[in-house]
Image (cartoon, helix red, strand yellow):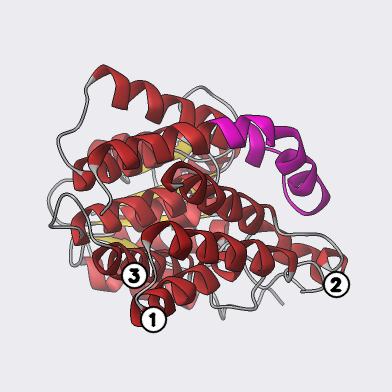
Amino acid sequence: MMDTDLFVAWFEESSRLIRRERDRLTRLDAAIGDADHGTNLDRGFSEVCKALADDPPGSASEVLTTAGTILIRRVGGAAGPLYGSLFRQMGRALRESPVTLAGFAAAFEDGVVAIERLGKATPGDKTMVDALTPASRALALAVRDGVGVHEALVKAADAALEGAKATIPMQAKKGRASYLGQRSIGHEDPGAASAALLLEALASVAG
Amino acid sequence: MGVVLVSHSAGLAAEAVRLVRGIAGDDVPVAAAGGTADGGLGSSVEVIEKAVRSVDDGDGVVLIPDIGSSVLNARLLADEGKAVVVDVPFLEGAIAAAVTAGAGETLAEVVAAAEEARTHRKF
């Protein structure tokens, strides 16, 4: 089971990993975007952690909804509305607390659909969807196979990381990088890289 | 009927509004929603919401975004029949929408006029 504290810890660890990797994310974004991904996310996730500490939420759903709302309001780049929609949709989908792995996997899938709908991106467009979709699939398979929560989240994190690396040879079809055309080939997508970090953070706190 | 121009740049949005007013008339309800809340390049759902409120007279608002997060943030505020985000060339769409809104047309007609700008040839 995944309790409210685990979800709060997820955002704390995400914030820590994003801060640690901030310069790498910004470098990736400098190659094919506007070089603000690392700093924007760092600021957004710091504010999420502050809000969760100031006013501790009572359920997993509330943690996710609060986080999503702050990211939408406080992150200036595309990552704000996208990650914000992911977490808010997950918060809406999660009715139970604590959360089962099956409930989490279903909510995560809903969240990824919300991102795809808002950004009109599909797998292969060189976006965060290329890391999130394999993670969602890994979670669904883990539920089917009846594996434990930690193992399932590790599989999801591995799938996201692999998905992020797979964006390197892709040509961007969505987002600012798409204006670069073929010049976007050869760089890892910063959104996919940060999505992989979020899943790494979750696997790490669930261990 | 209101029109909101959503740009990554506060300066660009403000100048686009000035140009649009010059063509469509000073009394056309067009508002600029440019940049982030702290004045940087980017977009902010709060800045856009404020602009929407400033031109919303109850008959609907058309939002015209430029690129990237402007599009995403504007789409977060889409509300069927009340706030419509259109996928059109920024300046041409803005002028077409504002002229039509200024003529007292409905939301659907303003959206259609903005969308026509997509296929309008300059020469």
Dot 1: what SS?
Answer: helix
In percent of the image, x 58 and y 78: which residue is there? A123
Residue type at tag 1: Asp
Q: Is residue A31 magenta?
A: yes
Q: Percent position (x, y) of residue A171?
A: 77, 73
* Stretch of the chain drawn in magenta: A16-40
Establish if A31 lies above or below B49: below
Residue type at tag 2: Gln
- Please give the residue where the numbered disc 1 appears in the rendered image: A145
Q: Is residue A158 magenta?
A: no
Report the Cα–Cα distance between label 1 and label 3: 49 Å
Decide if residue B15 is on the left or right side of residue B4.
right
Q: Are marks 1 and 2 on the same chain?
A: yes
- Please give the residue where the numbered disc 2 appears in the rendered image: A182
Q: Quadrant of residue B75?
A: bottom left
Q: Main secondary structure of the magenta part?
A: helix
Residue type at tag 3: Val
Report the Cα–Cα distance between label 3 and label 2: 33 Å
In percent of the image, x 30 and y 34: which residue is there? B50
Front-lying residue, A127 or A101: A101
Q: Percent position (x, y) of residue B46?
A: 35, 35
Please report, as a chain letter, where disc 1 is located: A
Q: Sequence-wise, which precedes: disc 1 or disc 2?
A: 1
In percent of the image, x 34 and y 70: which residue is there? B111
